[in-house]
Image: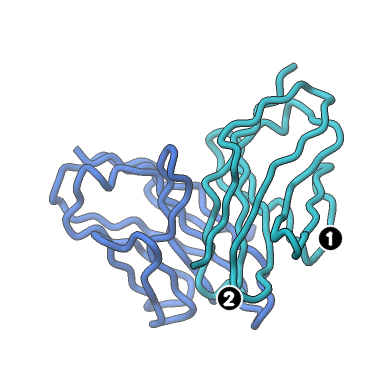
Amino acid sequence: AQRVTQPEKLLSVFKGAPVELKCNYSYSGSPELFWYVQYSRQRLQLLLRHISRESIKGFTADLNKGETSFHLKKPFAQEEDSAMYYCAPDSGGGADGLTFGKGTHLIIQP
Amino acid sequence: EAQVTQNPRYLITVTGKKLTVTCSQNMNHEYMSWYRQDPGLGLRQIYYSMNVEVTDKGDVPEGYKVSRKEKRNFPLILESPSPNQTSLYFCASSLSGGQVSYGYTFGSGTRLTVV
């Protein structure tokens, strides 16, 4: 069965500290991996696609196929990074929608 | 502006009174889907659609219906709402890329309360 796990419900770090949000997946084939972010009372937004290898708002994510992980990282957290973060593997080219992890609530303390 | 528009943003209704939440996108996207978001459970997919007249169940379809008569619209229908359908609902759409996924664009959400 396809499964995505975000082990931390809540992650609290101080401003300026490094951040790592974990995501592990169990999927057949080679899914594409996405991170979505939801700021307070706002819609979900696409943050990162692993295939594009971009750095958005200072975040990067490395796909580790051996460990089936796609952890989201940022070297220096900022207060505006406080949000809910969702990992979403996609094995169907997007056709059948997304299966999300349960999300990690990131709180950046001043 | 490219966007996914949901209406209404907020809705309070009574048990058993049929309602429809509309979703419209102006990006000519083939793929559309509905999700509900609940505390502690994250986002769960209700239904999805790959194109006009092509819809299928997601993980939590019970109590919901959808239709896709036009490419831009994908309404969510609750024939007989119950209190356990109180939730925050999101509609999303994506361009078709064959085996490549472009990621989804989300609407602003509809907060539904069923009393």
Percent from the top left, x then y, of residue A106?
65, 32
Percent from the top left, x then y, of residue A35?
67, 52
- Which chain does the blue colour mark? B
Which residue is disc 2 drawn over? A92
Q: In the figure, is residue B96 to the left or right of A81?
A: left
**Numbered badge on residue B54:** none
Which residue is disc 1 drawn over? A53
The subunit letter for the residue under badge 1 reads A
Tell me the element at label 1: loop
Question: From what the image shows, is residue A82 above or below residue B25?
Answer: above
Percent from the top left, x then y, of residue B24?
47, 63
Number of dots carrying numbers: 2
Camera sees residue B89: yes
The subunit letter for the residue under badge 2 reads A
Amino acid type, label 2: Gly
Camera sees residue B27: no
Q: In the figure, is residue A27 to the left or right of B56?
A: right
First-in-chain label (1 vs 2): 1
Instruction: Give me the C-alpha separation between circle 1 and circle 2.
Output: 20 Å
